[in-house]
Amino acid sequence: MGEERASTWDILRERMVKEQIESRGVRDKRVLEVIRKVPRHLFVPEAYLDEAYDDHPVSIGEGQTISQPYIVALMTSLLELKGDEKVLEIGTGSGYQTAILAELAKEVFSVERIESLAKKAKKRLEDLGYKNVHIKVGDGSLGWEEHAPYDAIIVTAAAPKLPKPLIDQLKVGGRIVIPIGDRFFQSLHRYVKKEDGSLEGQDFGGCVFVPLKGKEGWD
Ligand code: SAM
């Protein structure tokens, strides 16, 4: 990639932040700064490079997608990360959201069901120098118990309901951000775990995600 090309990416990224993210109300300065920094085009397959900074999800193969930039920003801001958290991500996909989390938290544990995607994401993140990311292949609807409890959990595929293992693996005061619904209607939820173990939930409106498969997800 020549210097001229590199600066084009920077311009596209800046425009994406202004026109797609800030304009829709995401204000968290740390999140915006990191989205300005992480080279999203390096997480998109060569064939779709031209769409890397567009206002929609992009195919990453295996029938999966890298989420729309605004949704990544919104979900990340809802986690309210300050820098010292242990975060669990379900659905590594391209690794883009993982990189954003790695910039904003202390450690990131990410579970991906599809081995080829997990391998590619791991290599990308290593090449970019991220040392606080751990990826495993498996059924993320069961969480990653070995490293629990987590300060924050993000699920980047739509679940039929909030998976119980994820609730169990969340710290008191911790946040889960997750799309819930079927193939036709989904909405984005955030739950905060209270002292007595119950959850306080809020609905952030409609969204479109690929389904969360697995024991606590869809068949
Ligand atoms: N966050 C990703 C990114 O930045 O590229 C996008 C994720 S994509 C919308 C959803 C991902 O969830 C897919 O890669 C899919 O294979 C994965 N997935 C679906 N069900 C899963 C499960 N039970 N466990 C782990 N990953 C799962």
Image: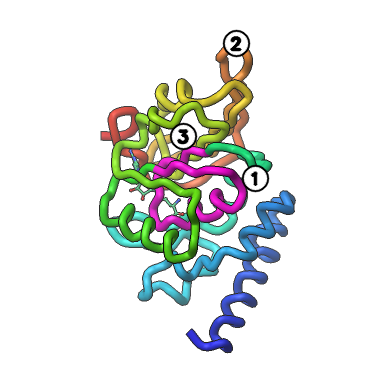
Tell me how far mark 3 sits from mark 1, CA to CA.
18 Å
Task: Farthest residue to the top: give it.
Answer: 196
Q: Residue at x 64, y 61 (%)?
A: 20
Q: Residue at x 49, y 26 (%)?
A: 149
Element on which disc 1 rests: helix
Q: In the displayed structure, does residue 105 sit left or right of residue 57?
A: right
Give the residue at mark 2.
196
Element on which disc 2 rests: loop
Q: Residue at x 51, y 26 (%)?
A: 170
Magenta-colored stretch includes residue 98: yes
> What residue type is disc 3 on?
Ile
> What residue type is disc 2 on?
Asp
Q: Which residues are magenta?
A: 87-110
Give the residue at mark 1.
77
Q: Is residue 102 above or below residue 43?
A: above
Q: Quadrant of residue 175?
A: top right
Q: Badge 1: few (under 14), some or many (20 or more) residues near its Cα, within 10 Å?
A: some
Tell me, yes or no, if residue 187 can be seen here: no
Q: Residue at x 68, y 59 (%)?
A: 33
> What x and y, as percent, mark residue 75?
58, 45
